[in-house]
Image (tube, grey):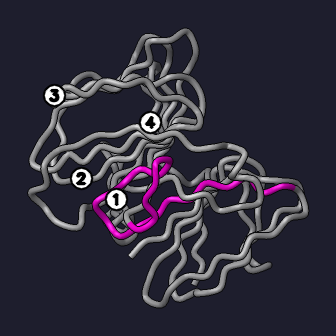
């Protein structure tokens, strides 16, 4: 089953310094029928104005992944980690037993990033943090793993959950095939352009699809697209 979620149906929060679009219940947006997709709990599409950000605040028992799409995002946390990430980089934080952190835009331009939360494979983990780089050229007509438990490597952020986040840039007229295992979920989120899935489901910019009971996926684009695919338990 392929269930489509149009971009315009996302909940929008506009605080002036921050504009967010929520794919799942978060903060002031509550929908008991849209709490999660398997272990995927949050996908916030955030734009932060210059010299603003999320001040120091606590997290626990959650795997938090941020993928920066433009600008520079500065991270600091109570375990002593500090880093600035930009496009082509990923940050992963395991909140575990508890951590304080901040995410700030110290630059002159907006920061646009995807913030995702995933339930961990087990509670009680020691908090940890990492930043990884990925080669943007390897996204072309390919599913490039950027976060994964199974597909480890220097350019793949580790995560304490049986999932893989892929990034892809699909050129006009190109096709990608993805084979999913039985009893798993697939989440697709279009960043730019448009794609079709299995020749029947069409997704435009910021549309998403939650897919179950489908093991053979064909993703096509007539005009080109950038998208994210997440393989979930």
CB under 8 Å between callouts 1 and 2?
yes
- Location of residue 198 by image quarter: bottom right
Please tell me whether residue 182 belongs to the stretch shown in magenta: no
CB under 8 Å between callouts 3 and 1?
no
Please tell me whether residue 159 belongs to the stretch shown in magenta: yes
Q: CA distance from mark 1 to mark 2?
A: 9 Å
Q: Residues within 10 Å of mark 3 (few under 14, many from 20)?
A: some
Q: Which residue is mark 2?
A: 62
- Location of residue 144 by image quarter: bottom right
Q: CA distance from mark 4 to mark 3?
A: 28 Å
Q: Residue at x 75, y 53 (%)?
A: 140
Secondary structure predominantly adopted by residues drawn in magenta:
loop
Residue 127: x percent and y percent? 17, 44
Q: Tag 3 or tag 2, which sits nearer the N-term?
A: 2
For the residue pair 192 and 99, the one nearer the viewer reads as: 99
User: Which image quarter holds the C terminus?
Assistant: bottom left
In the image, the segment drawn in magenta is 150-171
Looking at the image, residue 74 sits to the left or right of residue 225; the answer is left
Q: Residue at x 46, y 64 (%)?
A: 151
Q: Tag 2 or tag 1, which sits nearer the N-term?
A: 1
For the residue pair 123 and 12, the one nearer the viewer reads as: 123
The circle drawn on residue 13 is 4
Q: Indicate which label's residue lies in the foreground, 1 or 2.
A: 2
Q: Indicate which label's residue lies in the foreground, 4 or 3.
A: 3
């Amino acid at each position: 089953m392929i269930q489509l979620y149009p971009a315009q149906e996302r909940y929008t929060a506009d605080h002036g310094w921050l504009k967010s679009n929520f794919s799942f219940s978060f903060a002031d947006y509550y929908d008991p029928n849209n709490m999660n997709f398997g272990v995927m709990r949050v996908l916030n599409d955030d734009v932060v104005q210059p010299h603003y950000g999320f001040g120091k605040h606590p997290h626990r028992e959650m795997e938090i992944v941020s993928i920066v799409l433009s600008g520079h995002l500065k991270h600091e946390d109570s375990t002593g980690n500090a880093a600035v990430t930009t496009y082509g980089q990923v940050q992963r934080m395991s909140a575990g037993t508890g951590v304080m952190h901040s995410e700030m835009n110290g630059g002159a331009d907006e920061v646009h990033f995807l913030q995702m939360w995933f339930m961990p494979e087990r509670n009680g983990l020691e908090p940890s943090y990492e930043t990884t780089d990925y080669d943007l050229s390897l996204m072309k007509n390919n599913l490039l793993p950027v976060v994964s438990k199974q597909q480890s490597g220097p350019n793949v952020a580790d995560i304490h959950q049986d999932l893989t986040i892929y990034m892809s840039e699909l050129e006009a007229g190109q096709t990608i095939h993805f084979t999913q295992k039985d009893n798993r979920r697939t989440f697709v989120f279009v960043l730019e352009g448009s794609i079709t899935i299995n020749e029947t489901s069409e997704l435009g910019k910021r549309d998403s699809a939650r897919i179950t009971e489908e093991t053979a996926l064909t993703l096509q684009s007539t005009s080109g697209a950038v998208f994210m695919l997440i393989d979930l338990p």
